[in-house]
Image (spheres, rainbow, N blue to C red):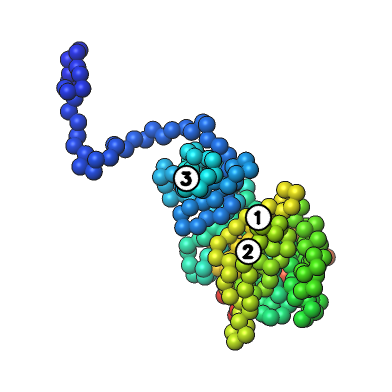
């Protein structure tokens, strides 16, 4: 039945009252076909600094994105004021598909995932050989997170002038990790930066590590002087570092030959989000041996087919031991 006549005007239409005084909701969303592409450099209390062409633009997330949040390393689409001038604000309307996501949880029993960085392809795990003492379980956890995210791990050992690196490197020798060992003198004269930078060229590398291991000092040596961040000292009483880096920040390498992402120092790296079945993918020499495993095999049980696979000479026993040590970190808290 027709409700209104042929010559209806706006006075004839009954509108539902809107006590809030705002516009009614609609499912129709603008396409923003003229949006500019940007790269998220840092996030601070709801404000995101993005690189748009050669300008640093401050932006906020559009309401239409809902609960989806942009993180450092994200490639996004922006509209609004893209001049980058003081007191201007753009709006992020799209977050592009991510090639990788590095996550962690506060603890192993915490189901809430925290995205550390997006779109990185390498994870530099920075550990001091002394002051503070190295914590292999923390390294193991970072390795598991890297393998789960599809990132290539790089082990960076600092302060080799205070303690030798041989014993710690022997622990990880069967994993085939790329590594760099540096001391304080090399950090000061630039030799360390040159050797580390070779492994970062053309890549997006996230740096993680405990507070006080020299992570930010190393990052500062890699980037231009005007991009350097504040650093701190190790607490003489507790033997732990102090948090001086409070938010992740993406920094360009000289010559635009890659990016480094400095992340806040962490004291735990929960793995609640990690699917143990993905860790085996970091051991291609063992993957074929899992075909005879029982369903839902943890690869650390009596009927695991990997024991026979290794006994037949298809892989080194040390490789299986390394896999099981990494899998065990999923069930063990860091520091145990």
In the structure shown, which secondary structural element does the residue marked by tag 3 occupy?
loop
In the structure shown, which secondary structural element does the residue marked by tag 1 occupy?
strand
Q: Which residue is mark 3?
A: 89
Q: Are marks 1 and 3 in contact (CB under 8 Å)?
A: no
Report the disc number at residue 251: 1
> Outermost residue toward the bottom?
237
> Outermost residue toward the top?
6
Q: CA distance from mark 3 to mark 2?
A: 24 Å
Q: Position of residue 156 (x, y in %)?
A: 74, 67
Q: Tell me if I can see residue 280 in this picture.
A: no
Give the mark nearer the N terminus: 1 vs 3: 3
Q: Which residue is mark 2?
A: 229
- Residue drawn 51% across the image and 68% down it: 106
- Badge 2 crowding class, 10 Å Cα cut-off, few under 14, some 14 to 19, many 20 or more, is some
Report the disc number at residue 285: none
Q: Position of residue 314 (x, y in %)?
A: 81, 62
Mark nearer the viewer, 1 or 3 = 3
Q: Position of residue 91 (x, y in %)?
A: 47, 43
Q: CA distance from mark 2 to mark 1?
A: 10 Å
Q: Tell me if I can see residue 127 in this picture.
A: yes
Give the mark nearer the N terminus: 3 vs 2: 3
**Quarter assignment of residue 307:** bottom right
**Quarter assignment of residue 145:** bottom right
How many numbered discs?
3
Give the mark nearer the N terminus: 2 vs 1: 2
């Amino acid at each position: 039945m027709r409700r209104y006549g042929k010559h209806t005007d706006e006075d004839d239409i009954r509108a539902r009252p809107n006590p809030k005084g705002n516009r009614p909701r609609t499912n129709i969303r603008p396409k923003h076909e003229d949006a500019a592409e940007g790269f998220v450099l840092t996030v601070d209390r709801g404000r995101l600094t993005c690189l748009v062409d050669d300008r640093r633009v401050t932006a906020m997330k559009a309401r239409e994105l809902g609960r989806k949040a942009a993180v450092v390393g994200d490639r996004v689409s922006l509209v609004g004021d893209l001049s980058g001038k003081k007191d201007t604000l753009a709006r992020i309307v799209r977050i592009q598909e991510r090639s990788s996501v590095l996550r962690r949880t506060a603890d192993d029993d915490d189901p809430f995932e925290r995205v550390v960085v997006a779109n990185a392809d390498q994870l530099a795990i920075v550990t001091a050989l002394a002051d503070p003492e190295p914590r292999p379980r923390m390294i193991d956890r970072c390795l598991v997170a890297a393998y789960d995210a599809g990132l290539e791990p790089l082990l960076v050992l600092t302060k080799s002038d205070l303690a030798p690196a041989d014993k710690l490197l022997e622990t990880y020798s069967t994993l085939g990790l790329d590594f760099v060992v540096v001391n304080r003198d090399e950090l000061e004269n630039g030799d360390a930066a040159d050797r580390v930078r070779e492994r970062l060229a053309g890549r997006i590398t996230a740096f993680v590590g405990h507070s006080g291991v020299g992570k930010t000092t190393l990052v500062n040596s890699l980037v231009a002087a005007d991009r350097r961040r504040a650093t701190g000292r190790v607490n003489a009483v507790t033997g732990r570092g102090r948090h001086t880096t409070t938010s992740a920040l993406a920094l360009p390498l000289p010559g635009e030959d890659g990016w480094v992402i400095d992340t806040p120092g962490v004291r735990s790296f929960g793995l609640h989000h990690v699917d143990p079945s993905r860790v085996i993918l970091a051991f291609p020499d063992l993957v074929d041996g899992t075909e005879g495993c029982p369903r839902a095999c943890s690869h650390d049980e009596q009927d695991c087919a990997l024991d026979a696979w290794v006994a037949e000479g298809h892989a080194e026993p040390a490789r299986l031991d390394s896999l099981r040590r990494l899998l065990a970190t999923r069930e063990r808290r860091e520091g145990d």
